[in-house]
Structures are given as structure tokens and as C-alpha cells.
Image (cartoon, grey):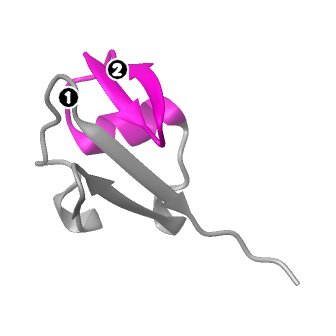
């Protein structure tokens, strides 16, 4: 399915869940915040939240530094 992820077109081959998309992208789930179509999706709902064609996903990955 075609998605927009952080402003770029992405073809998602997984099962359609947010969790599967994060796996496909190799995201560090422990340090990721995510929105779908402008709505925050809590990490506890990633496995049950299904993506649809043309959804917009924004990911923010937190990294430490000094």
C-alpha cells in the first residue's frame, strides 16, 4: 500500500499495522513517537492500528546526545 512517511512516498508490504510498518522501517520502537493523519497513536495501540492506502505517517525518533 502507498503511504506518506515523514513526507516521502513509501510502499508498505507488511500486514498493514503501524507495528508492521515500524518493523519494516527498522525503527527503534522504544524511542519512537508516531502520528497517523495528524492523530497521535500510542505505542500500546500500534499492533491494532491498521493503515490505509494514502495515509500520512509522521515518525519522530528520539536520540540521546550531549
Contact (Cβ within 8 Å) of mark 2 with mark 1: yes
In the displayed structure, 46 sits above or below 22; it is below
- The percent position of residue 61, horizontal first and vertical second, equals 56, 61
Kindly identify the residue that appears in the image at 13 percent across and 47 percent down.
49
In this rendering, would 35 be left or right of 8? left
Residue farthest along the bottom direction in this orientation = 66
Instruction: Quadrant for the C terminus, please.
Output: bottom right
Kindly identify the residue that appears in the image at 31 percent across and 27 percent down.
3
- The percent position of residue 8, horizontal first and vertical second, equals 49, 30
Instruction: Quadrant for the N terminus, please.
Output: top left
Task: Bin the neighbour count of mark 1 within 10 Å (Cα to Cα): few under 14, some 14-19, many 20 and up.
Answer: some
| Of the pair 21 and 5, the residue shown nearer to us | 5
- The percent position of residue 2, horizontal first and vertical second, equals 29, 18
Range of magenta residues: 1-25
Residue 16, labelled with which disc? 1
Residue 65, labelled with which disc? none
In this rendering, would 27 be left or right of 3? right
Residue 12, labelled with which disc? 2
Amino acid at each position: 500500500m502507498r503511504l506518506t512517511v515523514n513526507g516521502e512516498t513509501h510502499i508498505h508490504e507488511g500486514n498493514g499495522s503501524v507495528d508492521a510498518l515500524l518493523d519494516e522501517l527498522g525503527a527503534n520502537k522504544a524511542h519512537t513517537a508516531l502520528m497517523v493523519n495528524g492523530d497521535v497513536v500510542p505505542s500500546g495501540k500500534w499492533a491494532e492500528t491498521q493503515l490505509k492506502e494514502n495515509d500520512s505517517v509522521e515518525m519522530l525518533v528520539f536520540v540521546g546526545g550531549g
